[in-house]
Amino acid sequence: MFSSGNAETLAKPLATQLGIPALRIAVVLKALDSEGEIALRPDGRGMVVLDSPRQPHPDDLELQARVRERVRSGHYTEGQAVPTGLLGHEFGRTTAQVRRAARQLIADGTLYEDVFGPYGPGLYVGRRRGRRRSGAR
């Protein structure tokens, strides 16, 4: 994961140029990184603007590969709720960063999002098969 110091370093010249406090710019840079709009470079040499959601965030590649492998191996089965909190803990990611990584997995059909899922709102393994509304009146 990239260090927060990187955002502060990048924020200083932007703050000077725009006349905005560096802290505000650093907060925005971190938020954009977390949402997958940009990727702050770990070496402190700038940022990469991502063509999201098609271009995966560099921090997400390992998590995405691990989830795909777990689906292929049968560790995660069709229709199973994906333990996003546990994945975040395992990979040292925030909830927002796990959701960012999941966008690519949803796009390729590995996962789907279901707000009315059998185990509550969340991410599930496999392709969505139409809209279900449990508890609908």
Image (spheres, rainbow, N blue to C red):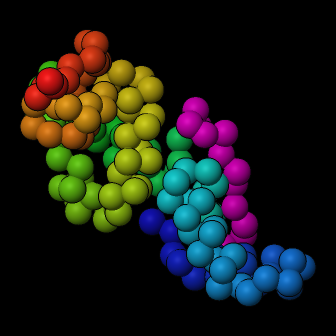
| Quadrant position of the N terminus in the picture | bottom left
Q: Quadrant for residue 92, please give it.
A: bottom left
Towards the viewer: 10 or 134: 134
**Residue drawn at (69%, 76%), measured in percent from left and top?**
25
Residue range in magenta is: 43-55
Q: Is residue 80 visible?
A: no
Q: Position of residue 78 (x, y in %)?
A: 15, 22
Residue 64 x/y as whole percent: 36, 40
Mainly helix, strand or loop, the magenta region? loop
Q: Residue at x 53, y 78 (%)?
A: 4
Residue 73 vertical placement versus 65 (above, below)? above
Q: Is 16 placed left or right of 93 in the picture?
A: right
How far from the left and from the top, in percent, is residue 91?
A: 29, 59
- 1 with respect to 49 (left or right): left
Q: Residue 108 location, x and y as percent?
A: 42, 23
**With respect to residue 40, does 24 lie above or below?**
below
Q: Nearer the viewer, residue 34 or 114?
A: 114
Assess whether residue 54 is covered by the magenta stretch.
Answer: yes
Question: Looking at this view, is 101 or 63 the one in front?
Answer: 101
Q: Is residue 23 left or right of residue 31?
A: right
